[in-house]
Amino acid sequence: MVLELLVNPKKVTGKPWEMFFLGAIYSFVAAFLALWIFKNYVSIVMITLTIIASVPLMSGIINQEEEKDRSIKREKSLLKEHSKAIRAFVYLFLGFTFTFTMLYIFMPSAIVEKMFSAQLETIITVQSGSPTGEFIGSFGIFSQILMNNLKILLFCMAFSFFYGAGAIFILTWNASVMATAIGSFIRNNLFYAHGIFDYFQVTMFGLLQYLLHGIPEIVAYFIGALASGMVSFALVKHEYMDPKFQNVVKDVSILIGIAVVILIAAALIEVFLTPLII
């Protein structure tokens, strides 16, 4: 309840960068409580508590954006307003990722294994099933990654439609998995570092390897969640009989199209650009 009272959705969308600190605080408090009270189930409880803290804020922002759909007619102005909400969500995600990554890097090994046990199992499963191949085979990998990302987008939209801000569950879980991958890479390679430049290089490689394509993916997921959530809020308020509901549907269709295009770009970056840089 205290965390809910700390923020106002209207103020947050005016300064999206503040969501980074909120995300960092939410996830740190959740990790501390989970480790303190639920030591045997810390990896799952940590995510659950982070979600509980984030749902009221995310619901407020989605409801606020749905109201804008009914009051603003120009699509360009609408997209500009929605971009503020999307930026706020992305900063929230980065706040989660930052805290989880720092915990993975600096906590003792025994605690890290408990705190991120579920996430580590997920990464091992994904890596064991990852296809390998040369450039021609990369198109097959691209198709597989894109289809997987589109599936996650559909899940986010479904969760957001049926549970309001339910998509935050998938997105928080993705933040913890990404943080585990980044933290594992940095922690393992820092062992071989011998100077400030080596530390910087390892950290940058760890971030670029996952954030370069990860951030566009998360942007797409948040766009899909926002679009589906707006329809859900409109239906709950029985506004589907209102002629202005057509504006909501039109805006949502455009947002979903943008999300799909971003996912295509993210898959191209992951398959063809990231390997060249790393």
Image (cartoon, grey):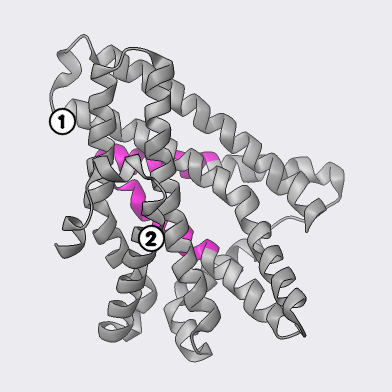
User: Which badge, 1 or 2, is on the more N-terminal residue?
Assistant: 2
Identify the image quadrant of the C terminus.
bottom right
**In the image, which is nearer the foreground, mark 1 or mark 2?**
2
How crowded pointer 1 is (Cα within 10 Å; few <14, some 14-19, many 20+) is rated as few
Residue found at the far top of this picture: 243
**Magenta residues?**
150-178
Distance Cα–Cα, label 1 vs label 2: 31 Å
Query: Where is residue 179 shown, x and y percent of the image?
Result: 52, 66
Tell me if residue 172 is in the magenta stretch.
yes
Question: In the image, residue 94 lies at what x, y percent?
Answer: 47, 57
Q: In this rendered view, identify the residue nearer to me: 86 or 226.
A: 86
Task: Identify the element where label 2 is drawn.
Answer: helix
Residue 52, percent across and down? 24, 60
Classify residue 57 as left or right of residue 251: left
Relative to 12, does residue 200 appear above or below in the rendering?
below
From the image, tell me which residue sits under label 2.
21
Q: Is residue 230 magenta?
A: no
Q: Which residue is mark 1?
A: 236
Label total for image: 2
Q: The disc labelled 1 sits on which kind of residue? A: Val
Q: Secondary structure at mark 1?
A: helix
Q: Residues within 10 Å of mark 2 (few under 14, many from 20)?
A: some
Task: Specify the amino acid type for callout 2.
Answer: Phe
Quarter of the figure that contains the N terminus: bottom left
Q: CB atoms at circles 1 and 2 under 8 Å apart?
A: no
Against 161, is 41 above or below? Answer: below
Relative image position of residue 172 (x, y in whole percent)? 40, 58
- Left or right, 54 with respect to 135, comes to left
Residue at 34% x, 84% y is 40
Q: Residue at x 67, y 57 (%)?
A: 208
Residue at left offset 31%, top offset 71%: 30
